Image (spheres, helix red, strand yellow):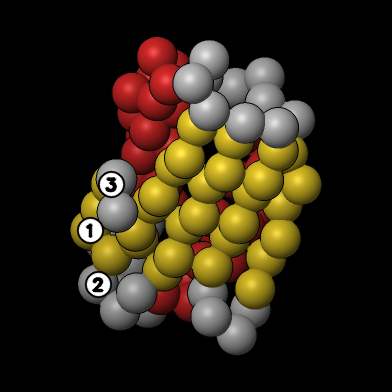
Amino acid sequence: MDLKVPYANITDKKIGFDAAKKLIPDVIAKLGVKTETKINESTNTIDAKGTGFSAMIQFTDTEALVKVDLNFLLKPLKGKILDTIERQLKKVV
C-alpha cells in the first residue's frame, strides 16, 4: 500500500466508505485523469482505472488503504495524487 489513512472522525468503516464513494470520483476527475470508477459494496473498495492510471482504496476496520499505480509519464505526479487523495479522505474519515 502506498498510503494508510487512520480513522480519526469515524468508528465504522461503512460510514467512511459511504462518504468516500461520493467524494473520490470527483477528486480523481479534478486531477485531470479520465478513469472508470467501480465501487464494490461487499468488500468496501473503490477502484479507479484509466489510461496509465490505477487506484484502489480499501476500507478496513481501522484505516483506509490507498494503492496507486501510474505509468512512466505520470510517475512524477504520484506524490501530488497521493497527497490530494489523503487530504480528501481525512475530511471524511
**Residue in view at x 47 percent, y 57 percent:** 57
Q: Position of residue 6 (x, y in %)?
A: 23, 58
Q: Position of residue 80 (x, y in %)?
A: 39, 20
Task: Look at discs 1 and 3 and give the one toward the viewer.
Answer: 3
Label 3 environment density (alpha carbons within 10 Å; few <14, some 14–19, many ≥20): some
Task: Look at discs 2 and 3 and give the one toward the viewer.
Answer: 3
Q: Earlier in the sequence, mark 2 or mark 1?
A: 1
**Residue in view at x 40 percent, y 14 percent:** 76
CA separation in Å, label 2 and label 1: 6 Å
Identify residue for label 1: 6
Helix, strand or loop at disc 3? strand
Identify residue for label 2: 62
Quarter the C terminus occupies: bottom left
Horizontal arrangement in the rendering, residue 63 relative to residue 53 (left or right): left
Amino acid on which the number 1 mark rests in the picture: Pro
Identify residue for label 3: 3
**91 up-or-down from 5: above or below:** above
Horizontal arrangement in the rendering, residue 6 relative to residue 21 (left or right): left
Q: Nearer the viewer, residue 85 or 52?
A: 52
CA separation in Å, label 2 and label 3: 13 Å
Proximity of marks 2 and 3: CB atoms separated by less than 8 Å: no
